Image (cartoon, helix red, strand yellow):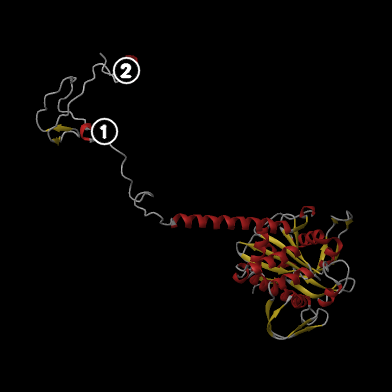
Amino acid sequence: MSDWPDGWTDDDQNRNRRPTPEGARVMPHVQRPPRQRSPEHDAYQPAGPGPAQGPGYAGGHDPGYDSGYNEGQIYRGAGRQGPPPPPPGDDYGSRPPGRPRWGRRIGYTALALVLALVTVATATYFWADGKLRREVDLSVVEDRPAAGEGTNYLIVGSDSREGLSEEQQQDLHTGSVEGKRTDTMMLLHVGSNGSTMVSLPRDSWVTIPEFTGSESGNRIPEQQQKLNASYAIEGPWLLTRTIEYNLDIRIDHYVEIGFAGFANVVDALGGVEMCLDEAIQDENSGANFEAGCQQMNGAEALAFNRQRYQEAEGDLGRTQNQQEFLGTLADQAASPATLLNPFRLFPVANASLDSLIVDEDMSLWDLRSMFWGMRGANRMNIPIANPGFQTPDGQSAVQWDMEQTEALMNQLRNDEEVTVGQE
């Protein structure tokens, strides 16, 4: 007789019954005595002898072992340790949530500023380097002297009217003469014993050596002429050749600036302050200055540097004014008020780079060295033997003292302290 509810069959019984594993027994609940911790290891041992095991107990195990499952407890023994506590100062440990990471932010900000400065400096360098007018190839100059110690710059101020309108020529009192000549020629030596600026009067009586014209290709014969005639004949190349031939000193770099460029640089600086011992009036150059200190704009500065008729020494007196003005201009251009003010620095740099004509090997670093060398340089004229020398054709010229000139050039070639003309 079946014990199943009505309507159930043995098939239903077999179909729905869960099989019981063979040998499975129901273990009775046994109350364990209190446990104490053993000092030798991290396992727990019973305080007294274990109770008798119930039926079906599989022997071979420590009768005092208790898994703790029947009381819902889990014990962590030796060798089964959880994750270590976070170290002090860890982000998810001691640091309060939401605290700003100031050190990291300052580091990122500093890095961003450095990268921005490097980017601006690099862009400025390539901008400035691209604006340099490298138009003079000194490699075509013939029979050049050996290079000496230090660096020699030939600085030339020409009367070029390039870029000037007729109205500007009137305002600057330049006239409208075609072509260009040299109004100013200076030899600047920069070396380990300081800098020396030597003016070469344009009326100096010199030998213009043979030269094959770099532009015309014509062979120019040797001749006795005034120094500025070499520039008029064949430009910077023959001028460089003539100076090297007569002074036996190598010109490392050539720098030229015209009327308009000179005035633009002065205006970009905001003017140059000059202090005059006496008043100057010169109708030819347009100079009209009272005695004392005054700020000269571009047009006034050009007039001051060109005037020579009021000077007792004529052209020699003018060269002294030019040296003094260029030294003051260099001091002002290199002052913190200019270098640290981008609204003044960039206009000055732009005006200078637009105005200068330099040799093909001139770098921005060379140009910087030239400006720094002009500051505080020893200033002097080439040693003169006769300022009123009469040429064979009756012209008035300047004759050099060749003994003193050779001694001076020897000191410059060897980068020695200049003593010639310093007494």
Select label 2 or label 1 by which is in front. 2
Q: Give the x, y percent position of residue 394.
A: 89, 74
Report which quarter residue 406 is drawn in.
bottom right
Would you say the residues marked 2 and 1 are in contact, meaning their CB atoms lie under 8 Å apart? no
Q: Quick one: which residue is furthest to the left in this view?
A: 48
Circle 1: residue type: Gly
User: Which residue is more in the foreground, 106 or 305?
Assistant: 106
Drawn side of residue 163 relative to residue 78, left or right = right
Mark 1: which secondary structure? Answer: loop
Q: Give the x, y percent position of residue 174.
A: 83, 74
Residue under the point 27% across and 34% down: 80
N-terminal of the pair, mark 2 or mark 1, is 2
Q: Give the x, y percent position of residue 348.
A: 69, 67
Can the viewer see residue 329? yes
Can you tell which mark lies on residue 79? 1
Q: In which quadrant will I find the N terminus?
A: top left
User: Which residue is more in the foreground, 205 or 254?
Assistant: 254
Circle 2: residue type: Gln
Q: In which quadrant will I find the C terminus?
A: bottom right
Residue under the point 33% across and 50% down: 88
- The image shows a total of numbered marks equal to 2
Can the viewer see residue 250? no
Q: Give the x, y percent position of residue 231.
A: 83, 64
User: Which residue is more in the foreground, 143 or 135?
Assistant: 135
Q: CA distance from mark 2 to mark 1?
A: 49 Å
Mark 1 residue crowding within 10 angstroms, few (<14) / some (14–19) / many (20+): few
Give the residue number, with chain letter if any, for mark 2: 13
User: Which residue is more in the foreground, 306 or 352?
Assistant: 352
Drawn side of residue 21 relative to residue 204, left or right = left
Mark 2 residue crowding within 10 angstroms, few (<14) / some (14–19) / many (20+): few
Drawn side of residue 234 relative to residue 33, left or right = right
